[in-house]
Image (spheres, rainbow, N blue to C red):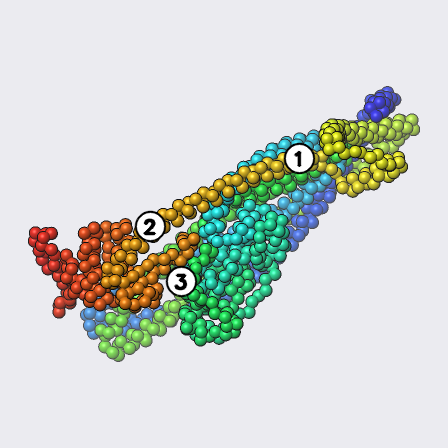
Amino acid sequence: LRKLLDAAVARLSELEQEMADRGGEEAKQLKEKLDGLRIQRARAADGIETSKETLKQIRLETGDANKERAKVQRETDALARERTNVDGRVGELDGQIKGADGDLHEVDELASKSDAKVLGIQKQIIALNNEIDQVEEKLKGIVLEGDRTKEAMGRLESEISQIEESRKQYQVEFDDTDWQLKELRSSTKESGKSLQKLQQEFHEKRAEEAKLAKEQAELQTAILSLTRQYAQIKAEADVAENMKRGYTAAVSAILECRETGSIKGIHGTVAQLAHVDPQYETAIVTAAGARMQAIIVDDDTVAAQCIDFLKRRKIGRATFLPLSKMLVGKPRGKAILVAKECLGFAIDLCHFDEKYRDAFFYVFGDTLVVQSLDEARKWMGGVRLVTVEGELIEASGAMIGGDMERSTVKFGPSAASEMEKIAEKLREAQTHAENVANLLDGIRKEILDLEGTIKDSGGKSGAVEVKASTLEAKRREFTARLAAAEKDLTERKDRFNLAEKTAKRIEEDLAKFSKALDALKAKRDERKKAVIEATPQQISSRMKELMSRRATLAEELSGLRSKLEAMATQTTFLEERGTEVDTRIGTLEDQRKDHEKRIESNQESLGRLETEIRGLEKTEAQMGKQMKDLQDARDAAYKEKTDREADLDKVTHKLETKEDFLLKMETELKVQEEQLSEAERVMKEMAVELTEGRLPTLEELKATITECETAINALGPINLRALEDYEAQQARAIELKDEFKRLEGQREELINLVNQLTDKKKEGLAKVFTAISENFKRVYAELSEGGEADLLLEDSEKPFEAGLILKVKPAHKKALRLEALSGGEKSLASMALIFAIQEYDPSPFYLLDEIDQNLDAVNAEKVARMIRRNSATAQFVQISLRKVSLKEADHLIGVTMTPESVSEVIMRVNLADIEDEKPTEAIPA
């Protein structure tokens, strides 16, 4: 191919030299002149077409401007007619007000003569009227300024809208011209600039590919690091979190998938997605039961993925609630809601996002919450009920209740932790890695496309160059128009923002002066009322009538004058708008005439150029058939040269591809040979014998090769880096398995540590419990004169998950639990427990509030004596009304109420502790 290309280049040079020798300088000049005229002809034709398109647009804009001018004229005429009518009415009202003022003046003079006090008040009214007139003038000026500002804002909004429309039109024209220019350049094969641009873009894509590949590697490293951190923290926290939240292993595993982002569409458990008021928590937890651990997901597809995940890992089972498939529930038992004892449906006492309502109806159904078991028994049967204390009555009538263990699963989201932050970072890194991988695939496809485009690109003809230059000029023109439109738009927006600030200031001034005007008018009205009250009744009645009439006329006149001012402002705006439209119409008319002249001039030039070109073409044709043959031969040689170059580029590309493929195959062959040697060694060690079978024929192999090639072609372009990516991912998988084993070991160590700590806590609790139990037995026997008492753990194996049972046997009675004792017996047992704890670990201070309220005198005295005895090691403050308790106290403080409603504090202190007795202190009640 290179030899053929060299031969084609030599042949082309020979033909061009022969044409130059035969045609000489004259033929060369003729050709250059003909090419120049053709270029001028193309430019003239393109100029005519451009001017015609511009004229078409000018006609459309002129029509719109004429319509707008007619509209402005109609509005101006209508406004003038209305203004004439209002002016007439204003004149009438002025006359009527002047007459009313004259009558009112006469009445004022009569009133002034009747009383000197009225004269003083009238002077005040005159002064107030002057102030009101001044404020009204200022207010009118502010209103007028506000109207002008609003009109200016409206005009600016209209101008901004028009400029934005023009900018959009210019942008469309610019985009169309730019697209045509790009299409023209991309379609040429001989444009060096286009080829250089493609090569530059190719190198940029290569650099971007390298950058993305580096970023992908960094992201993979970051993901691995975050995965390790998350797994380590997860291993440390899963035991404590599961003990705290009470979740099963399956639920915890699914929540971990949500945190790591390995399964999309998981919202969380029912317990996590709702929160409940503490007063209803026991009832809601009882109503939900095990369904608190149900997991809400987007749809059944996500639920199926989660179930498959649990089956593959053999972790356990969980309940999933797909939002797309949950049925809308229809609650029963609405008749019970009217009862005041009913607190409402359980689902309504939970706070959650409304999009989860169908899922929460599955959990709670139509369960109703009532205050107590007695109330629930009234309504039981046919509806599910739960009490505030946790008793549950099924719709079938079954009743569930008794001593309730505290549930470890709680409503509300889990506390934020470092693990959640790392999980969020891990999800972001994985999402970013996916985006980078997609971008990398797209860049590689673009690189392949650019390689093909660069190889297929060629030069351009003279006419194409002319069209390209014309399009470039149009693009520069629209760029300038866009820049001017942007500048105008920015200027209008700045003016609009300034007008907005002015309007805001005017509103504030208007409110301030309106408030001041209202205050002055109110003051003036008060003064007028004072005048009326101080004048005789007949004059007063006449004055009221005249003042009422004048106020009505003044109000109407004020409204009409405000309307006139608004009309004046609107008239000014319409006149300015009309002037702008006229100016725009004149500008469009000048542009139309200019383009018509350009069309006429270009048409004349086009006719002249056509004549010259035809003459030169005839001259060129007369130069002889031999020169024509040479030209045809030269064109054929040039075509052959370009074809050879294209063939050479294609063959070179294929050769490079095959060399890369060959290098890859050689590398794989070495790997396969090593694997084959290893397999032969293993088979030899395992004593496996190879049996030679029938080898396929050459025709069968060719048919197989053809089928494989067809399958390969159907697959499309092959990513040769897929094997490298696979090996990297496989190595990463092995590394993650090792990391998983290490984390499993750490998890076992942490579980053992938790068990050890639990055992130590149990030992400590047992020690404390034994000591306090012995003290309790002894103290209770002392207080009850021979009674017996005992402390028991509800679950000695799991003391931290259960409660404490207190059993006592008063003297001469049977043993009973605490809840079965009387009030006095409960108080005695409680004090015995307090004294038992004090003897084990005393506090420095105790406050006892009427602990002897339910005790008889004998037991109250026993408790008082024991408190006095224990006061040697701690300080006791006791509130009591029992004399036996007061008798044993070291200091007494009493509060009484005197007949004068003053609290009196009476103190009796131990004189052995202080020198002087404190005086009685009087404190106002």
Residue at x-position 78% and y-position 42%: 714
Vertical arrangement, residue 781 with respect to residue 499, above or below: below
Pointer 1 local density, CA inside 10 Å: few below 14, some 14–19, many at least 20 = few
Mark 2, other Cα within 10 Å: few <14 / some 14–19 / many ≥20: some
The disc, 3 or 1, on the residue closer to the chain's N-terminal end is: 3
**Crowd band around label 3 with a 10 angstrom C-alpha radius: few (<14), some (14–19), many (20+):** few
Report how far apart the C-alphas of labels 2 and 3 lie in the structure: 33 Å
Q: Residue 407 carries which label?
A: none
User: In the shown orientation, is residue 476 left or right of residue 910?
Assistant: right
Q: How far apart are marks 3 and 1 (CA)?
A: 59 Å
Q: Nearer the viewer, mark 2 or mark 3?
A: 2
Q: Residue at x 77, y 30 (%)?
A: 658
Image coordinates of residue 844 in percent, x first then y, are 23, 50
Between disc 1 and disc 2, whose residue precedes? 1
For the residue pair 574 and 88, the one nearer the viewer reads as 574
Query: 777 or 663, which lies in front?
Result: 777
Residue pointed to by mark 1 = 727
**Could you say where residue 340 lies in the image, as x and y percent from the top left?**
41, 73
Q: What element carries label 1?
A: helix
Q: Which of 805 and 19 is in front in this view?
A: 805
What amino acid is labelled 2 in the image? Val
Q: Position of residue 466 (x, y in %)?
A: 74, 35
Q: In which quarter of the image is residue 882?
A: bottom left
- Mark 3 = which residue? 279
Q: Note whether 481 is above or below 254 in the view shown.
A: above
Residue farthest to the bottom, as pictured: 538
The secondary structure type at the circle numbered 2 is: helix
Work out whether mark 2 precedes mark 3 in sequence or the reverse, and give the earlier one.
3
